[in-house]
Image (cartoon, rainbow, N blue to C red):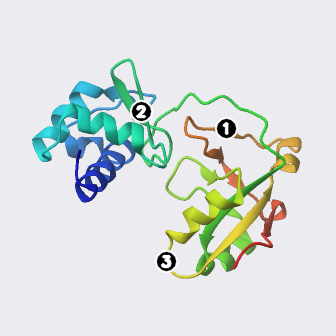
Amino acid sequence: MMKAKLETEVSKYMSYVLRHAPEAAGLTLDGEGWVSFDELEIALTSRYDVSRADIIEIVENNPKKRFTLADNRIRANQGHSIEVDLALKQVEPPAVLFHGTSLANWSSIEREGLKKMQRHHVHLSADVETAQIVAMRRKGEYVILQVDAARMFSEGHSFFVSDNGVWLTESVPVQYLSRNAGTP
């Protein structure tokens, strides 16, 4: 069993190379963000004192389920800043979705809505609790936003859900947003 600090460090590095900078580990992702697990293992074991079993444990026990491992290939489930096509299929969302963010961001979101910024999609949660967990990782006070996903969908906006249950959309215009009553 790895020490928690090492596990966190390896997991963060995996997120970094699988979502933002594969070249930093000498990796090349395919068009859908996949890379050979063997290649990732070589990159990680040359940098950290970890085994193949340790890496698999990180993938399987990651609380955010950031990675998918299939057929000796691995990829990040979402959050890429590099060009990849996750081959997600459009699905109808729940009536309401949630987004946790820093209170400092609220004034610009209130004017402009939620934007994907450097990523491929805006990330949304199916429940307030998950949005709060995300928001609490931000600096300072936070706010939970409620998204009228049913109305967005009925008015032609596309939604996708990643392998780890994160809801994704291009943007959330301001008319579909409200501050959640459960926000501290």
Where residue 143 sits: x, y (%)? 67, 74
Q: Which residue is mark 3?
A: 139
Q: Which three-letter amino acid code belongs to the residue tagged 1?
A: Phe
| Mark number, residue 19 | none
Q: Earlier in the sequence, mark 2 or mark 3?
A: 2
Please tell me how crowded label 1 is: few (under 14), some (14-19), or many (20+) other residues with Cα within 10 Å. many
Question: Which quadrant is home to the N terminus?
Answer: top left
Where residue 87 sits in the image (x, y, percent)? 56, 27
- Badge 3 element: loop
In the picture as drawn, the residue positioned furthest to the top comes out as 71
Residue 22 location in percent, x, y?
Answer: 29, 41
Q: Residue at x 22, y 32 (%)?
A: 52
Separation of disc 2 and disc 1 at Cα?
A: 16 Å
Residue mark closest to the camera, 1 vs 3: 3
Q: What residue is pinned by disc 1?
A: 160
Please determine whether, in this image, residue 164 is positioned above or below residue 100: above
Residue 70 x %, y % = 41, 22
User: Marks 2/3: CA distance?
Assistant: 30 Å
- In which quarter of the view is residue 98 placed? bottom right
160 to 125, vertically: above or below:
above
The residue lying toward the viewer, choosing from 94 and 114, is 94
Residue identifier under label 2: 33
Q: Which of the image's four quarters has the C terminus?
A: bottom right
Q: Residues within 10 Å of mark 2 (few under 14, many from 20)?
A: many
